[in-house]
Amino acid sequence: MSAQIKVLLAEDQSMVREALAALLGLEPDIEVVAQVARGDEVLAAARAHGPDVALLDIEMPGMTGIEAAAQLSEHLPALKVVVLTTFGRPGYLRTAMESGAHAFLVKDAPAAQLAEAVRKVLAGERVIDPTLAAAALAEGANPLTDREREILRAAADGSTNAELAAALHLSQGTVRNYLSTAIQKLAVRNRAEAVRIAREKGWL
C-alpha cells in the first residue's frame, strides 16, 4: 500500500471543517493530520504536522486563505495548496494562483472530486474548477495595482483620507490620487462602490 497523503485542513466553520475531514478520512490513501479554524494558524500547523497538501478556505479570520497560501509558498514551497471557496469569483482564482495555490475548487464540488484534486496536486498537476476558469478568462485581469488594492481594502471601513494616510504612511494627496484612479478604473462613482465591485470580482 502506498504512503498516506497527509492533509492540513483550514476552515473557520466547524461543521464544514468536520464534514470535509470525515469525507476525506473515508479515502484509503488520505489522512487529515491537522485542522485549524484561522488563516494565521496555518503556517505553524503546517510546520508542526508536515502535511503533503493544505486545503485552505478563502474566508477565514486572522488571514485569508489566499494570504495563507502565499505564506506557505514562501516558507514551505514543497507543500501543495488547494484553495476552497464558497464564492465563485473569478478574480479569486487569479489571485490564488499568483499566491502559489496549485488547485482552486468550489466547496460544493463532490467529495470524490476533492480527493482526486488532492492526489493530482501531489502528482504535480494543477486542478481548477472549469466554470471558474472560463469566468476568469472572460473577466480579464485585475486592473488594480497592489497599492490601489491596499488602499481600497483599508478604505472599506469608512476611514477618512486623513486616517488612511496616517495608517498607510502616505500623504493625503497620494491617498486621494490612488482612490481616484481606482474609482476611474472600475467606472464607479465613489469609493464605497469601488470597494463593493472589487470585492464582488475577487480583486481585493
Image (tube, helix red, strand yellow):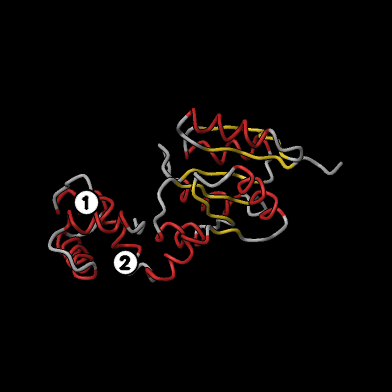
The amino acid marked with disc number 2 is Leu
The front one of 66 and 114 is: 114
Q: Earlier in the sequence, mark 2 or mark 1?
A: 2
Quadrant into which the C terminus falls = bottom left
Instruction: Give the x, y percent position of residue 117.
Output: 64, 51
Q: Is residue 181 above or below residue 16?
A: below
Location of mark 2 (residue): 144
Which mark, by number, is residue 17? none
Q: Position of residue 65 (x, y in %)?
A: 47, 46
Q: Secondary structure at mark 1?
A: helix
Image side of residue 200 versus residue 1, left or right = left
Badge 2: how crowded within 10 Å, few (<14), some, or many (20+)?
Answer: some
Amino acid at the residue labelled 1: Ala
Position of residue 50 relative to residue 103, above or below, is above
Q: Tell me the number on the disc at residue 155.
A: 1
Location of residue 53 in the rendering, given as x and y in whole percent from the top left corner: 65, 46
